[in-house]
Image: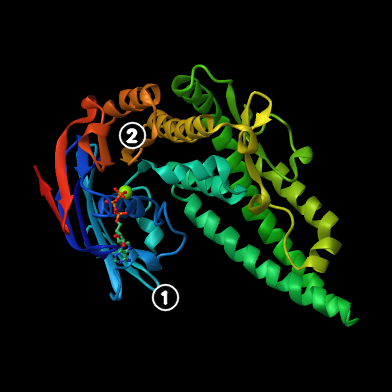
Amino acid sequence: MYVRHLQVTDFRSWEYADLELEPGPAVLVGQNGQGKTNLVEALGYAATLGSHRVATDAPLIRHGCARAIVRTAVVNEGRELTIELEITAGKANRARVNRGPVPRTRDVLGILRTVLFAPEDLALVRGDPGERRRFLDELLVLRTPRYAGVRADYDRVLRQRNALLKSSGHARRAGSGGGDALGTLDVWDGHLARYGAELLAARLDLVADLGPHLTAAYAGVAPESRPATIRYRSGIAESFPAEYGTTGRADMEVLTDALLAAMAAHRDQELDRGVSLVGPHRDELELTLDAFPAKGYASHGESWSFALALRLASYELLRDDGNEPVLVLDDVFAELDRRRRERLAEVSVAAEQVLVTAAVPEDVPSELAGARYLVSDGEVHRE
Ligand SMILES: Nc1ncnc2c1ncn2[C@@H]1O[C@H](COP(=O)(O)OP(=O)(O)OP(=O)(O)O)[C@@H](O)[C@H]1O
Ligand SMILES: [Mg+2]
C-alpha cells in the first residue's frame, strides 16, 4: 500500500499543506521546527486515530482554530480509497470514506496502515507498562481493525464497573450493605470478563506471532548484544496454559472463566479500593535481554535497539499477514549508529513506500534518497 496524497488544514503548525506522493522512498527535509513531524503525525493519525506524541487530540489543532482536517488518499493493490478526518476539540470527531460520512471514526481503521519509527519509541522500553500495552493494542488494531471496537467496549465497561465498585464500596463502608449493587456488579463482571478475554486472547496470540520476529530483528540490529525476547505477563497467568502467548492459540472460554474467578477472588479488595484490579488493563509486555528485564538494565544503545526491533518486528509481522504497511521514519537516522542505520535502511528500501524526515539530508542513507520535499516557512516544495 502507499499514500498517494496527503492534505492537512489547521493541523498543528500547518494552516494548509498538500503533498502528492508516490511509491518508494520520499524524504522530507527542513530545519528544526518547520513542521516535518507534524505532516507524518497527520498520516499516523489517519492510520491509528491517535498521535505518537500526545495522548489527546487538542494539541493537533492549530492554535486558535476550532478544528483540524486530515485528508489522505491511499492506494492498496490498485484500489484507491480516501479518508477525511475532522478533529474537533471537545466534540466528537467526524470521518468520511470516499467522501461519504461513516457512522464512527473508527470505521476508517484498516484503510491506511503505517509503522512509524520515532525518537519517542525509546519510551516503549523505558516507559510505563501503559506504553507497551498501547503498542500492543495499536498493532492489534492495525492487524485486525475490529479490535478497535473490542478495546472501546472494554474501556467503557471498565469505567462503568469502576464507578460501581466505588459507589458499592462507599455503601458497604457506610453499613448500608449495598445488596442490589452487588448483584449489578455480577453483571458487570460478566461483561468485563467477556471483552477482557477477547482482548487478552488477541494480545496473547499477537505476542506469540510477534516474538520470533522481535528476536530476529534485535539480533539483526544488535548482533553483538544478548538475545532479546518478549513475553506477555498477565495477572491471571497461573490460570491458563503457559503456551498461550508463545506457541498455542488462546482459548476465549478458558480466559473468560479465569477472569471471572480472579474477579471473585479480588472482590473485597476491589470494593475497598474502588478500582478493577484484574484484567488486560493491568497487564504488561515484558521485554527481556537474556534473563534481565530491558527496562532498568539495558544500556542506552540496547534500549534503542530494542525499540527499533519492536517496530521492525511489527513491520515484518504485518507484511507476513499480506498487509504491507507504509513505513515512516521520523528523525531516526540521526539517533542511530552506522550498523543500525544500515540495517534500518536495508529493511526500509524494500518497503512499497517509506517516508523519512530529517533536518539534514546527510543523515539519510543514500539508498533512501528518493523524492525530496523541502519543508520551510509553512510550505512544502517538491525539489
Ligand atoms: N497546535 C499547534 N498549533 C500551532 N503550532 C504548533 C502546534 N503544535 C505544534 N506546533 C508547532 O509546530 C512546530 C514543530 O513542528 P514539527 O515537530 O513538525 O517540527 P520538525 O520539522 O519535525 O522539527 P525537528 O527537525 O526539530 O524534528 C513547533 O514550532 C510548534 O510550535
Ligand atoms: Mg521532527
How many neighbours does mark 2 have within 10 angstroms: few (below 14), some (14-19), or many (20 or more)?
many
Q: Secondary structure at mark 1?
A: loop
Q: Secondary structure at mark 2?
A: helix
Residue that mark 2 sits on:
333
On the picture, is 288 further left or further right than 64? Answer: right
Which residue is depicted at the point 31% across and 29% down?
348
Across and down, in percent, residue 200 comes to 63, 45
Q: Position of residue 52 (x, y in %)?
A: 42, 51
What amino acid type is highlighted by mark number 2?
Answer: Phe
Residue found at x 31% / y 26%: 345
Between residue 20 and residue 295, name the one nearer to us.
Answer: 295
Residue 144 appears in view: no
Q: Residues within 10 Å of mark 1 (few under 14, many from 20)?
A: few
List the single residue furthest toward the left: 383
- Cα–Cα span, label 2 and label 1: 36 Å
Task: Please report the residue visible at 51 percent of the width from the left and 28 percent of the height from the top.
Answer: 214
Q: Which callout, 2 or 1, points at the residue further toward the start of the chain?
A: 1
- Horizontal placement of 104 versus 299: left or right? left
Task: Give residue 288's mark.
Answer: none
Question: Residue under circle 1?
Answer: 90
Quarter occupied by the C terminus: top left
Percent across and percent down for residue 20 are: 14, 47
- Image side of residue 207 versus residue 166, left or right: left
| Tag 2–tag 1 contact (CB < 8 Å) | no
- Evaluate whether residue 173 shows in this view: yes
Residue 168 at x, y percent in the picture = 79, 75
Ligand 1 quadrant in view: bottom left
Task: Give the farthest residue toward the top.
Answer: 224
Report the residue at 29% width, 30% height from top. 351
Q: Is residue 354 above or below residue 219?
A: below
Give 171 or 103, whichever is nearer the viewer: 171
